[in-house]
Amino acid sequence: MLELLLHLTILSGINIILAVSLNLINGICGQFSLGHAGFWAVGAYSAAAFTVYAQLPVPPEVNLIIGCFIGFIAASVAGLIIGVPCLRLRGDYLAIATLGFGEIIRIIIMNTDSIGGPRGFSGIPKISNIFWVYLFVAITIIIIANIMRGTHGRAIISIREDEIAADSMGIYTFKYKTMAFVIGAGFAGTAGSLYAHYTQFLHPNGFTFMMSVIILLMVILGGLGSITGSIVGAIILTLLPEVLRLMGETISEWRMVIYSVLLITLMLLRPGGIFGKHEFNPLKYFKKKGEVA
Amino acid sequence: MSEDTMYFFWDLGQYLLNGLTQGSIYALIALGYTMVYGIIKLINFAHGEFYMIGGFIGYYCIMGGMPLYMAFPVAMLGSGVIAVIVEKIVYRPIRSAGRIPALITALGTSLFFQYTGQLIIGADSKAFPTAIEQKMWFFGEIMISNIQVIILVTTFILMIFLWWLVNRTRIGKAMKATSYNHDAAELMGIDTNKIISFTFFVGASMAGAAGVLVGMYYSTVEPMMGLIPGLKAFIAAVLGGIGIIPGAVIGGLTLGVAENLVVGFWESTYRDGIAFLILILILLVKPAGILGKNRKEKV
Amino acid sequence: MSTPILEVKAITMRFGGLTAVDNFNLSINKSDLVGVIGPNGAGKTTIFNMITGIYEPTEGDIHLNGKSISGERPAFITQQGIARTFQNIRLFKDLSVLDNIRLAGHFRADYGLFASIFRTKKYHSEEKRIKEESIEFLKIFGLQDKQELLAKNLPYGEQRRLEIARALATKPDVLLLDEPAAGMNPNETKELTELIRWVRDKFQIAILLIEHDMRLVMDVCEEIYVVDHGELIAQGQPKEIQNDPKVIEAYLGTEQA
């Protein structure tokens, strides 16, 4: 039981990084991407390839940090390659193009024998643990939150609000869209590295379009544009399958059906997600209660 | 001509034929995508599921002893009716919320049918009953089966019918009017909701027909069968110019042929990759598609 | 005579076979108040879109402070000194009034992405400067009490005012107003007239106004260009324009009919 709890905590952490980074692209910048699992895969495979084939003679933790860095760089390069052509597209076209790229990444991995191809990539050392995962969760959140509160972050948000108006403010919208896309992809890569060195095994089928949808669901559940929302969304969707499993075999089988109904009802009733664009700040609530009392 | 070059041309002919067969299936599904997009600007992700549903209705009808010529229209009707229900319950309320929420809703609907299908019918693929004995003919080294002929002929007939429906009937005119301008169409006394329902019905029944044809062609049906062909049909629609009906046909056939050439002359694992590659190329070079006109956003 | 701030030289815009704007000329000096009028579909907005870089003219050239800007990107043109408002108000609706103004200072913010990640000294000093300057602007426009409100929660007239304030906060040489009186009642239009004059006097900048509300233009502009079917049909002071038979035929005539 304790082991399961630890496992879920680590998975939650990885999912938080994925959700927060996707939120930077989809929620904060308003560029609808459906290919996040692709960047996750790029990070996971490149970091794993590093530790399997080119590990340095340093303590494993240092290798992990280097791996996370490599994952970030590889995924953000992939983000740049995909983002520059795709970000000229708008709305649903962008969604489809990123979906396409996500699948292409997976198909390329499937056809690359040195990283396991269709057999999967095994023999990755287990060097990531709860400490490292949450260290990177903290780093991700702090960096993205800090960017958001500066002038670059405001520029990124202004694109979501009104791209034409942002242009008329002298903001190079394409540059900032690309920036958001590349940073978001990069952190997904870091999450990939942490994931690879935790599960020790990667398979292309773990990074399908469906995974992109699940990450998207985490973001939407919490609220497009809200970082705290993404954190809550990631935790809920990590725990939900386990909770459903506790409720019995049949309900657990209905997991994906429940997800899909959740997605539809959310859109129909509360398209902004639980928190909408706003941040959830527990301190604020204490203050308010204090004032009333 | 040397023997090698001879074989090259026989192979080429065979791949082209297989490609056209595959492509006409894509085209049938793409028609629904393009019609729905044309009228409400929605990428209906669940469209591939209407195709799957058609395949299964066909499967159960034939298993129940129904002859093919009856099972076929029943499958079309069934897919169409389910699409109309989905449109009414799910898409209609979300229509005013913007394109991205509608897109997500469509995504959810697609997942819903895939996984509900897996739970009710089972995830394993079912052997499609042989409704007709398969026969083969040879033209030199090119092999053609009677099922391929049926697919090509049926697709051709359905497309002619659709062309007639859209261009030569009152309801077709109303569909065009609604897709140009909802409000204006409404003011002209067109019940746009009814027209949208009808569009879903026609589109989904085309996909349902494709489902039965594919069941016969590959002899299997399974709940996830709609995912990849659905995406590819969408790509076909974008390739031809989304919203443009002849574009869906051109896009579907092009994609089918391109895929079969890649599989035949190169590597079968890249089969799915080529479609996405084509998608990205077309989006970058001419987002409006082969038949589309590029438009600039109005300020 | 000094060189004009903005000089539009024989620009032409063709969309396929359609000529939306044909050989249009315009020049504005510092602190001029100029209007472009014409019936709907006359090509006014196309002229605007060419000046602001949304379209590249098929022919002709546009000079700002003696430098060619035609074909440049909209953001670049704003940075060079042309700011604009939109016919259907384009504020950042879900951002605060203050953030709307702060965004106008974005391209002058002198710190990089890393400074904002690591919260350097430069970040703090620049953010402080941008905030102070923005609040100054809000004070000038009487919006300082509403700086925390979301832009979408302002009343219509104040949204218009915020949009003008936001455009001015980019510190332009020329301000372009696209049908600012659209959707306003006569009272609000009157206030707007005063606001426009006041802005010109206060900031000493050139203002170019597109409008089909004749009264506003006649009231506020010193020089008027009349376009119809993409062509310049008259140019002059409000009085001259009012009595020009060509204008009456093209514009007033149709309106009175």
Image (cartoon, rainbow, N blue to C red):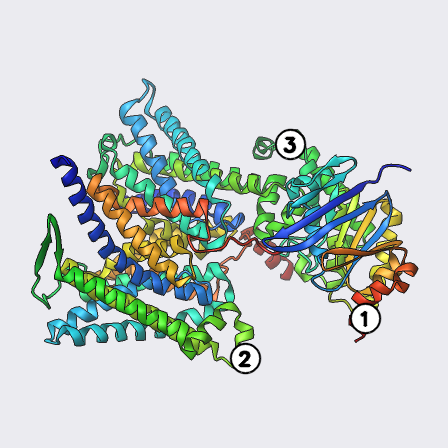
Callout 3 environment at 10 Å: few (<14), some (14 to 19), or many (20+)? some
Which image quadrant: the C terminus of chain C? bottom right
Residue under label 3, please give it: C111
The residue labelled by disc 2 is: B188
- From the viewer's perspective, tell me whether residue A176 is left or right of residue C151: left
Residue C67 is situated, as x and y percent measured from the top left of the image, at 75, 35
Please tell me whether mark 2 or mark 1 is closer to you in this view: 1
Image coordinates of residue B37 in percent, x first then y, are 43, 63
Q: Position of residue A130 (x, y in %)?
A: 36, 38
Reply above or below: C243 against A112.
Answer: below
Identify the secondary structure beneath mark 2.
loop
Q: What is the secondary structure assignment of the residue under circle 3?
A: loop
Position of residue B22 measured from the top left corner of the image (x, y, whole percent): 24, 55
The residue to which callout 1 is attached is C253
- Residue at point 67%, 32% (across, down): C110
Front residue (pair B72, B249) = B249
